[in-house]
Image (cartoon, rainbow, N blue to C red):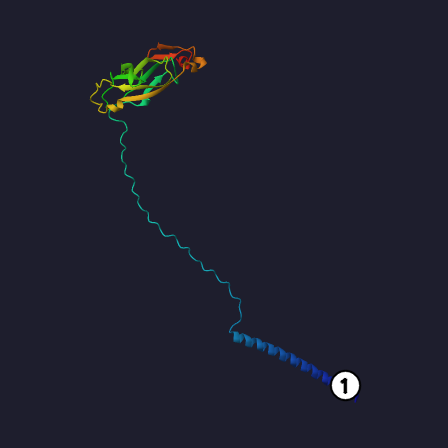
Amino acid sequence: MRRIATLLGLVFIVLSGLIVCLFAITLFLNRETVTRLSLALAGSTPTTPAPATPTATSTPLPPSVTPTHTPLPTFTPTPSRTPADLYINAEDIRVHPEPQIYSGDLVSSEVLPNDGAAVGLNDLGVAINLADGAEELQLGFTRVAPYDIGRWMQATFTWIWDTTGLIGSQKIIVILDPANDVVIGDLDQSNNEVELIIDVLPAEAWPVNETETILVMTESNCCIYHYTTNSAAQRGI
């Protein structure tokens, strides 16, 4: 009996082992079948999608600009401001002594007329008058002549005006061709006169370092000089 029981136990153990093996095989087969069925239903083996390649977009070019031709302005010559006439401007007159005139000074002047008509200025008459109320007092009259080494045309007035006793604003009038001798080249006589206002300071306002000066004249090989002593002009000569 003991042998039979032992034999039965062994058979039971063997049978149990076989059952476990069959169960494991069945479970493995079922899992493989399920996997195949799932893949079949999906249609293909799942793959990782490739990253999308960005599509290059072109930047539109700006519209082309058609060059336009801009015409250049038409040049119109400006009429000359120099009249074709005998005339004079304030800047054509120099008055001395400079830079200031004091009561008691002897005044000189140079006048440089303009020959816009190119008729020649040699021997042209020039007068300088002093306005005395409603009247005019002639201070001097001379004629234009070539002057200095440059031989420019100039009317020279030397010490023609004694300012002793005068103080304040004084008006002098420079007149070209006062006798109206010039006919050709002087159609407009309104530009033959210039008025200048000269400020005469009191003698007491004369700088101390110039109170001992006097007006003198000297001559060189080319020129005649009018100047005051003890001045920069004298040192320059």
Q: Position of residue 229 (x, y in %)?
A: 40, 11
Give the quarter of the figure containing the C terminus: top left
User: 149 left or right of 14?
Assistant: left
Determine whether the residue tagged by mark 1 lies in a helix, strand or loop: helix
Question: Which residue is at the front of the view, 110 or 58?
Answer: 110
For image coordinates 25% across by 24% down, the residue present is 190
Q: How far across and how far down the image is residue 47, in percent?
A: 53, 68
- In this view, the residue in front, 50 or 115, is 115
Q: Is residue 63 above or below residue 172?
A: below
Residue 115 seen in render: no
How many labels sit on residues? 1
Q: Where does residue 62 sit, x and y in percent of width and height?
A: 38, 52
Q: Position of residue 144 (x, y in %)?
A: 27, 16
Q: Is residue 23 visible?
A: yes
For disc 1, the neighbor class at 10 Å (few under 14, some 14 to 19, many from 20) is few
Q: Is residue 37 left or right of residue 17?
A: left
Q: Amino acid at mark 1?
A: Thr
Q: Which residue is mark 1?
A: 6
